Amino acid sequence: MKTQYLPGARLSALILSLTLATAMCALQTAKADDGERVVESTHYSSGGRDARQAIRTSRDSFAATEAVDKTARRAAAKSGQQSSQSPNQDFWFYSADIILFGDEDFDGFYSGIDLLFDADTVFSEADVYAVAYLSFEGGPWEEYAVTETFTIFGASDGDDYSIVTDLVSGYPTGNYDVLIELFDAFNDDFLAFIGPDDTSELSFLPLEDIGRDTPAETVVVINSESGGGSTGLIGLFGLLLLVLLSRRLRPTSSRRVALPAPRA
């Protein structure tokens, strides 16, 4: 936080400059939303959050045209663009768990998603992969992560998979839904899905990208030409108190859900 002592004329000029700077930031944000979406993800094998092992780290970019035209593969499957047009009854999601992290500006919107899920099957084992999507404020589903091929073993609880993702750019501040789809690694058949219609844990997630999660520098302006020095000093102390309180009251978010399903 910076404190500046300015005469009245310079104070007016500063206010004008801050207004213009705010307008420019808003314009740059709008332009960024028209550009690509960028995420950085680390993929983890089974073991929950305590014993999981990282298997891949990637930085993925999605063009603006993909953001506009992209729909979830489940919708594509229903339109006949894939060989399997409906969920396979031999596969299902047993649980899904989300923990949000990264809120540097303490506004209640997070820039990180720790997604963990467990898929099951009636077969002894099956090689599969999953695709994760985000939907901004009820808009179209936009792919943000694709897993490695992994093996699920019947209804075992030791074959979970997790993706920890930083939203780098292209994600406006707001509420997002998450959808996960499961596919056969051999022929890409659609197998199962879980989303906001199945559990509230995957809905209304307060998110924003890292570019919007940067604390703004606070400038305290004191007009040295005006009277009322005592009132100005009280206002300054009040502002300092608010800043300190905002840093102490940092919000956290943890979402967990376990969906009941038959276990062998």
Image: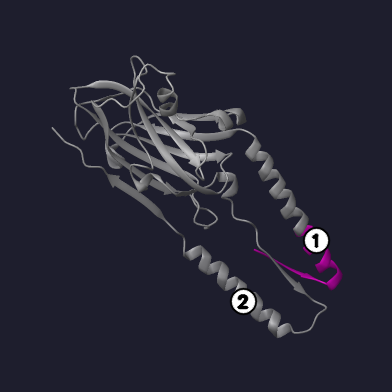
Residue drawn at x 38%, y 34% is 180
The x, y position of residue 133, in whole percent, is 45, 34
The residue that disc 2 covers is: 237
Q: Are marks 2 and 1 in contact (CB under 8 Å)?
A: no
Residue drawn at x 53%, y 47% is 208
In the rendered image, the vertical position of residue 74 relative to residue 95, given as above or below: above
Q: Taking 12 as reference, is 75 left or right?
A: left
In the rendered image, the vertical position of residue 126 relative to residue 145, given as above or below: above
The residue that disc 1 covers is: 16
Q: Which residues are magenta?
A: 1-18
Q: Which mark sits nearer the N-terminus, 2 or 1? A: 1
Quarter of the image for residue 49 reads top left
User: Mark 2 and mark 1: span between their CA atoms?
Assistant: 25 Å
The x, y position of residue 237, in whole percent, is 62, 76
Position of the C terminus by quadrant: top left
Task: Please rate how many residues cluster around mark 2, counting C-alpha atoms within 10 Å: few if below 14, some from 14 to 19, many from 20.
Answer: few
Local secondary structure at mark 1: helix
Position of the N terminus by quadrant: bottom right
